[in-house]
Image: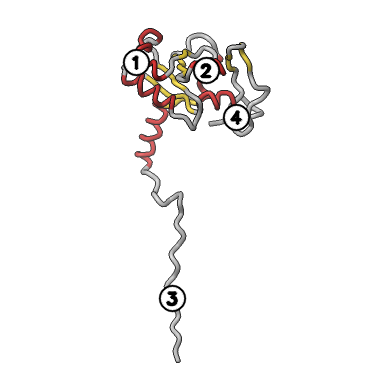
């Protein structure tokens, strides 16, 4: 009696990271360059606002009045997304870039506000991380009670031993 052995190899496990191959370097450069044209980092916004003077942009908080009262970035303009069509021209100059924000990474309110402003002819970026990461990175906020700041930044979101994350 002869036995037959199965010589076929089991399929190699699929690599979920490389299941779809990376883009070409030229396509990646175009994509990431475009991404930077649409987004601003919380730390970069804070650094510019912290220098004082004209930052070269207007920061817009697109959340509700209750959310605004709870905490907002000092110096931001309050313009809820639903009110953009009727109030943007009274509050914003089309010659000055706008940076929008909302709650945080799990919220697309800043994106919707940016879209509404872009459709009205404004140059616009969205602040990644929103008010959540502004607070988690330890930057000052303003509330209906005044200004406040966390004692320290969340070590999972910001460097604890430097002002520069190195990125």
Which comes sooner in the sequence, label 2 or label 4? 2
The disc, 1 or 4, on the residue closer to the chain's N-terminal end is 1
Label ID, residue 7: 3
Residue 118 location (% of width, % of height): 34, 21
Label 3: state its secondary structure.
loop
Q: Nearer the viewer, residue 123 or 82?
A: 82
Under tag 1, what secondary structure?
Answer: helix
Give whichever of discs 2 and 3 has the lower sequence position: 3
Q: Could you tell me which secondary element the residue under label 4 belongs to?
A: loop
Relative side of 50 to 7, left or right: right
On the image, the x and y values in percent for residue 151 come to 68, 22
Mark 4 sits on what residue? 158
Distance from label 1 to label 4 (Cα)? Answer: 36 Å
Q: CA distance from mark 1 to mark 3?
A: 68 Å
Say which of marks 1 and 3 sits in front.
1
Q: In which quadrant will I find the N terminus? A: bottom left
Q: CA distance from mark 3 to mark 4?
A: 53 Å
Q: Which residue is mark 1?
A: 85
Q: Nearer the viewer, mark 1 or mark 4?
A: 1
- Tag on residue 66? 2
Whichever of callouts 1 and 2 sits on the residue coming sooner in the sequence is 2
């Amino acid at each position: 009696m002869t036995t037959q052995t199965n010589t076929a190899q089991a399929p190699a496990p699929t690599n979920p990271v490389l299941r779809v191959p990376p883009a070409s370097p030229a396509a990646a450069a175009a994509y990431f360059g475009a991404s930077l044209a649409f987004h601003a980092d919380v730390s970069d916004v804070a650094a510019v606002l912290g220098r004082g003077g004209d930052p070269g942009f207007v920061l817009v908080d697109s959340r509700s009045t209750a959310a605004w009262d709870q905490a907002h970035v000092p110096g931001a303009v309050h313009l809820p997304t639903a009110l953009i069509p009727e109030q943007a021209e009274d509050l914003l100059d089309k010659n000055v870039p706008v940076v929008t924000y909302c709650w945080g990474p799990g919220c697309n309110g800043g994106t919707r506000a940016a879209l509404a402003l872009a459709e009205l002819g404004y140059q616009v970026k969205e602040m990644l991380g929103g008010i959540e990461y502004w607070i988690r990175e330890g930057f000052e906020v303003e509330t209906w009670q005044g200004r406040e700041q966390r004692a320290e930044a969340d070590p999972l979101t910001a460097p604890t031993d430097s002002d520069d994350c190195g990125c």
